[in-house]
Amino acid sequence: MKILLYIKCLFLVLPFAGFAQRCNHANQIQSLYSQLAANGFDTQKPIAYHYFFIDSNEQDLNQLKDVLLKQNYKYVRTTKNAGKYQLEVEKNEAHNASSATQKGKSLNELTKANNVETFDGFEIFSEETITEDDNLGTFKQQIERIPTAELYKKALELYDKNEDAKALIAFDRCIKQNINLETSYYKRANCKTALGRSQEAIADLENVLRLNPQHYEANFNLGGLYFDAKNYDKASVFYQKAVTINPKSDIGFYRLAETYQQMGMKNAALQNCQKALQINPNNEYAKKLIAALK
């Protein structure tokens, strides 16, 4: 998984309103690179450094831009905010605290030589690899800080966005806090199914049924999980419970028929296909299964 390393450093005493504020002077640059080194940042590896210049006159910035392009900088953009223009250029370079400080001084001199008001420092852009486990560990810490009153809402939001691994973490905490247990177990089971953790999903769905034996979706999904595991006896039990709870479920009768087909119970399979078609004559799956059974 990739994240963006996004570090700012400023050479100004006073930032301009409207533009990003970056850290000040050599002592803060030293602190910045000390932090980077502590996190395994490789100062020998060239990465994208973005440099910023500010002036009230766009023409002066354009002249400086031409000078920088001749020095192999890449033009990124010019933006305007609060009556000031900001020029942004990019160059792949490798710096440590000492060379970054010296680079800042050189660019500050170049800025003055070209009648531009301010060299506004640099930003570092780099893609660093972190593991999914590291990312989820950080997310888990964030979830632990969410107030209990907002936790369930956040879990549902993640679930609706199909962010299964994160939703699972949120529902973990909901369950520990005894928040909407029936739904939390059910939705956590679906997250686990999506993540390929079928046995854990089965355990959660069984917890749903302990709380509410008439939960149609939990029975139906348990049928599906056991069917996928080729445990057709158990699949048939839960599909039968599902259609008993919801006798208007054509897909429930079709899945029960499919299970009976796998068990070699042709007549039972045909009967349940016919029930599915009585409920929904347009159930193409049931039609195909009947054709296969004849």
Image (cartoon, rainbow, N blue to C red):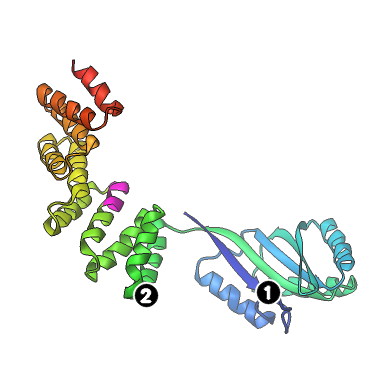
Q: Image point 21% across, 63% down: which residue?
A: 181
Q: Which residue is mark 2?
A: 145
Q: Please report contact status of discs 2 and 1: CB closer than 8 Å, yes or no.
A: no
Give the answer, above or below, for where 255 lies relative to 158.
Answer: above
Q: Image point 62% across, 62% down: which residue?
A: 125
The part of the chain drawn in magenta is 190-196
Give the answer, above or below, for where 152 lies relative to 292.
Answer: below
Q: Position of residue 183 (x, y in %)?
A: 25, 59
**Residue 282 visible at all:** yes
Q: Which quadrant of the figure has residue 186?
A: bottom left
Q: Earlier in the sequence, mark 2 or mark 1?
A: 1
Q: Image point 39% across, 60% down: which residue?
A: 157
**Disc assigned to residue 98:** 1
Q: CA distance from mark 2 to mark 1?
A: 39 Å
**Residue 133 visible at all:** no
Q: Quadrant of the C terminus?
A: top left
Q: Is the magenta region chiefly helix, strand or loop?
A: helix
Between disc 2 and disc 1, the foreground one is 2
Instruction: Inspect the image, locate mark 1, and give the three-letter code of the amino acid beneath it.
Output: Ser
Residue at the limit of the structure toward the top, as seen here: 294
Q: Which quadrant of the figure has residue 254?
A: top left
Q: Image point 14% across, 56% down: which residue?
A: 212
Q: 86 or 83: which is nearer to us?
A: 83
